[in-house]
Image: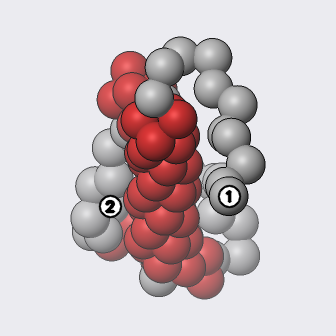
Amino acid sequence: MHPEIPCRHGNPFRTLAAEVGKVTRRVAATISECQRAQVRMTVLRLSPDRLMADPNAPPDTYAEFLMRTSGPAWPEPDYEMMRREMR
């Protein structure tokens, strides 16, 4: 004999499936965020500014400016998009 699963909203298996779905979405959002962070970390690690004595100083020449900005542009993620993914 199986013990009854307490359920407030009807069918216990639907409730369980809903909870599994929530956990799955959260795990997927966490993995996606980790992947974004890994790519961002790689871009920062390979940036030319990292090798400079004073990376916060402005460039002295136009050529130095072009060298510093030669890497890929990395837009910050949209807040609304991030909030939707975390649900």
Residue 84 higher or lower than 18, as above or below: above
CA–CA distance between discs 1 and 2? Answer: 69 Å
Please state, as top left, top right, bottom left or bottom right, where the N terminus lies in the image. Answer: bottom right
Q: Quadrant location of residue 76?
A: top left
Callout in the foreground (1, 2):
1
Give the labeled residue for mark 1. Answer: 1
Q: Which mark is residue 18?
A: none
Q: Nearer the viewer, residue 9 or 51?
A: 9
Residue 48, image x and y in percent?
Answer: 47, 77
Residue 12 higher or lower than 61, as above or below: above
- Is there CB contact under 8 Å for labels 1 and 2? no
Residue at 49 percent of width and 49 percent of height: 20
7 to the left or right of 40: right
Give the labeled residue for mark 2. Answer: 69
Residue 23 higher or lower than 52, as above or below: above
82 to the left or right of 67: right
Residue 52, image x and y in percent?
Answer: 62, 77
On the question of residue 60 being in view, the answer is: no
